[in-house]
Structure formats: C-alpha cells, structure tokens
Image (tube, rainbow, N blue to C red):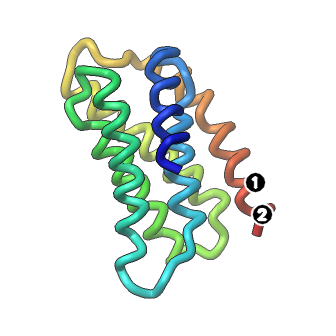
Amino acid sequence: MLIPLYLLCLIQVAVGPMFPQLALVLVILLSWGRDTASSDRHRLAPTLLGAFAGLCLDLSAPGSAGLNLLVFALAGYAAASFKLIIYRGRWALLVICLAALILRWLLLSASDSRALGLAAHLVSSALTLPFAYLGTRLLVASR
C-alpha cells in the first residue's frame, strides 16, 4: 500500500497546489478501515502511514519543513482514535478531512509568507471533500 500512496504524493506535487489532497483522503480512509483492537496499539500503524505520506510530500515539495508529516500523522491518528468512539463514520471522516485541511493551511501560512494562498487552498479543499465523501460511501458500502 505504500507504493501507490507514494505515487499519489508524487502526482499531487507534480500537478500543483490546486490538485485535490487525495493522499490525505487515502490516509484517512485506510486509517478508518483498519480492524481495531481494544488497546492503544491500533493507532500506531495509521499514524505511521500518515507520517509516511506526509514525509513523501515534504521531500517532494521543498519549503513545507515537515508540516505535511505532522498534519497527515495527526489525521491518521484522529481517524483511528475516533473509530473507537463513533459507530457510524460517514460524517466523522468528512469532519476529520476538513479539520486536517484547515490545520494544513494554517500551519503552512504561519510558516511561510509565500505559502499556498487562500484561494488555491479553497479550490484544493473544494476538490478534496467530494473525494472524501465518495471514499466514505465506498467504505460504508463495502462493510
């Protein structure tokens, strides 16, 4: 699963800032779709998956200085954590995706004045959320 995630990160960087954050959606869906145990160990794999995707984006797009790693790892951890609390995750996954997009924009705009502008981020978010919704529908339908 790491190779398709890595290729998706490379495509995302190559297309530009107005491309949907499909790697983020994939990390959240894979983190939510994992079988969970009652212990805290189930959060490690989704967090590491998110950290890998964020690291791939950070290495491909200089200037982000580990912020994608932080946001993606937190998104994977949040999806794995909320799965234990929330029974139906259709709207929870969209909320996690939206929170991760907002956190990513806030961290990037605070770290660099030349970072992704608000208009480009809004376009990227508007393109990302339908993919998150479609992914959640597929995840719910597969169960």
Percent of width and height locating residue 130 = 68, 37
- Kind of residue indicated by mark 1: Leu
- The residue pinned by badge 1 equals 138
Horizontal side, residue 62 vs residue 8: left or right: left
Residue 61 falls in which quadrant of the image?
A: top left
In the rendered image, which quarter contains the C terminus? Answer: bottom right
Q: Residue at x 61, y 38 (%)?
A: 129
Question: What number is the disc on residue 34?
Answer: none
| Residue type for callout 2 | Ser
Name the residue located 75 percent from the left edge and 54 percent from the top edge. 137
Numbered disc 1: secondary structure? helix
Quarter location, residue 71:
top left
Residue depicted at x 52% and y 15%: 15
Residue 82 is left or right of residue 59, and the answer is right
User: Residue, x 46% and y 67% (percent of image)?
Assistant: 80
- Is there CB contact under 8 Å for labels 2 and 1? yes
What residue does disc 2 label? 142
Q: Position of residue 116 (x, y in %)?
A: 36, 18
In the rendered view, tell whether residue 24 sits above or below residue 105.
below
Task: Choose between 71 and 41: the one closer to the eye.
Answer: 41
Can you tell which quarter of the image residue 111 is in?
top left
Q: Judge left or right: residue 64 versus residue 97.
A: left
- Is the residue marked by circle 2 packed among few (<14), some (14-19), or many (20+) residues within 10 Å? few
- Residue at the right extreme? 141
Q: Nearer the viewer, residue 86 or 10?
A: 10
Residue 34 is situated, as x and y percent measured from the top left of the image, at 55, 68
Rendered position, 16 above or below 7? above
**x, y (%) of residue 29?**
58, 54
